Amino acid sequence: MKSMLWFAAGVAAGFVVAHQINQTKQGKEFFSSIDVKTKAFSQAVADAYHAREAELREHDAA
């Protein structure tokens, strides 16, 4: 139980620190770059998933 309390405190502290960092110009640029990279990665995964799904459908239809 004690470890869960420490975990929750760490998560809360992380959010507070991230919020404070996001108040600065460099922080906004940093989080913006992370957002762009995350969206690009997510799109690449989705594209690969859909390509594989289409490939499997073609195989099943044949």
Image (spheres, rainbow, N blue to C red):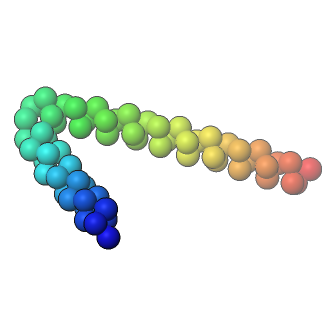
On the image, the x and y values in percent for residue 10 come to 23, 54
Q: Residue at x 44, y 36 (%)?
A: 40
Q: Is residue 21 visible?
A: yes
On the image, the x and y values in percent for residue 21 come to 12, 39
Whether 29 is drawn above or below 43: the answer is above
Q: Residue at x 92, y 50 (%)?
A: 62
Quadrant location of the N terminus in the rendered image: bottom left
Q: Residue at x 16, y 36 (%)?
A: 28
Q: What count of labels does the image hold?
A: 0
Q: Is residue 55 left or right of residue 45?
A: right
On the image, the x and y values in percent for residue 59 come to 86, 48
List the single residue furthest toward the right: 62
Q: Is residue 15 visible?
A: no
On the image, the x and y values in percent for residue 42 come to 47, 43
Q: Is residue 53 left or right of residue 48?
A: right
Q: Nearer the viewer, residue 9 or 21?
A: 9
Q: Nearer the viewer, residue 6 or 30?
A: 6
Q: Residue at x 55, y 42 (%)?
A: 45
Q: Is residue 47 left or right of residue 55?
A: left
Whether 31 is drawn above or below 17: the answer is above
* Quarter occupied by residue 2: bottom left
List the single residue furthest toward the bottom: 1
